[in-house]
Amino acid sequence: MTKEPFINNDFKEAVESHIFGNLLIKDTYSPLILGIFGPPGEGKTFQLEQVCRSLDIQQTIISPGELESPNAGHPAFLLRQGYLEAGSIRPDCATLKPAVLVINDIDTVLGNWGELVQYTVNRQTLYGQLMAFCDKPNLVSKMATKRVPIIITGNNPSILYQPLLRAGRMRILSWIPTVKDKLLIVSRIFTGIPETQLKCLIKKYPGQPVSFWSDINARFREDQLNMWLKSQEKSVLLRLLQSRQEKEWTGKEATFDDVKKIAHTLSIVDIRQKSFVR
């Protein structure tokens, strides 16, 4: 039986408060930016998507790769364009659809990585544009626009430009799931396994993020798919490909032994725990 994914209540309340505070209150004191920071693979982006979906909030997403360009000023232009788009009336609806501007993994492109970082004009203009949004959220490039809440995700806020993190501009939400959080998340992934057994597995791999358990589920389904493919005639598979009809997942659900076996395998080949430098 499929269950709704688990969303931590504190996480949900922080996102909802940020969105409502910026979109509903006329003379709001809410900072324009909510920064969600925590270890990689712990579900920041996924939970944000679920909360926005539950509120029917449109996400205008900018990836860190879009903020890199050899052309001076282009990334800041894309940032302004995304903000204006999020505050505009959608062509497919007669009214303004509430929206947020989301920048994922912002520290990968704007973080201070010491000797690895190149201080470019684009970095300066991006920081300047983000701070301009905070100071004048209803005016972008001399164009009046709706106030648009901004949500950024990342791993380490300490390597970002500190004036941007000022309380009036950004509220920081630290997301590090507890063992209880992980148990609730993982129990929604493996619905057929008792929580007592899942708890034992989570304690066995305390350093593994939430994505580790999602990867186990993906590996299990991949193994099931390979078994199904081997049982089919190639001509049947080719006809299915040519029909372009997607099949619903009909494989069995993972058992405790399945998860235990794959967890052991993935923990051995976990490249995050290895060094390839000699």
Image: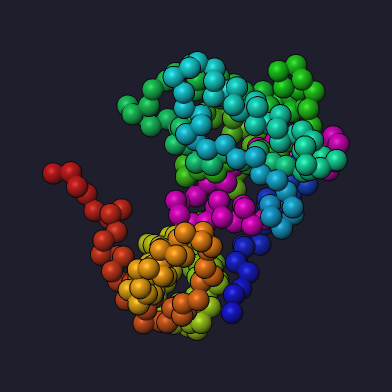
Residue furthest toward the left?
278
Asked whether residue 113 is drawn in magenta, I would say no
Task: Point out residue 193 in the picture as x, y percentages from the top left corner.
Answer: 48, 82
Q: Which residue is painted at 52% across and 38% down in the image?
A: 63
**Image quadrant containing the N terminus:** bottom right
Numbered disc total: 0
Q: How is the image coloured?
A: rainbow
What residue appears at the point 67 percent right and 23 percent down from the top-left corner? 132
Left or right of residue 267: residue 17: right
Q: Quadrant of residue 235?
A: bottom left
Up the image or down, 150 lies above or below 17; here it is above
Front one among 197 and 156: 197
| Residue 32 magenta | yes
Tell whether 30 sits left or right of 229: right
Q: Quadrant of the C terminus?
A: top left
Viewer-side residue, 3 vs 137: 3
In this view, 46 is above or below 98: below
Point out residue 237 in the picture as x, y percentages from the top left corner. 40, 67
Q: Which residues are magenta?
A: 24-51
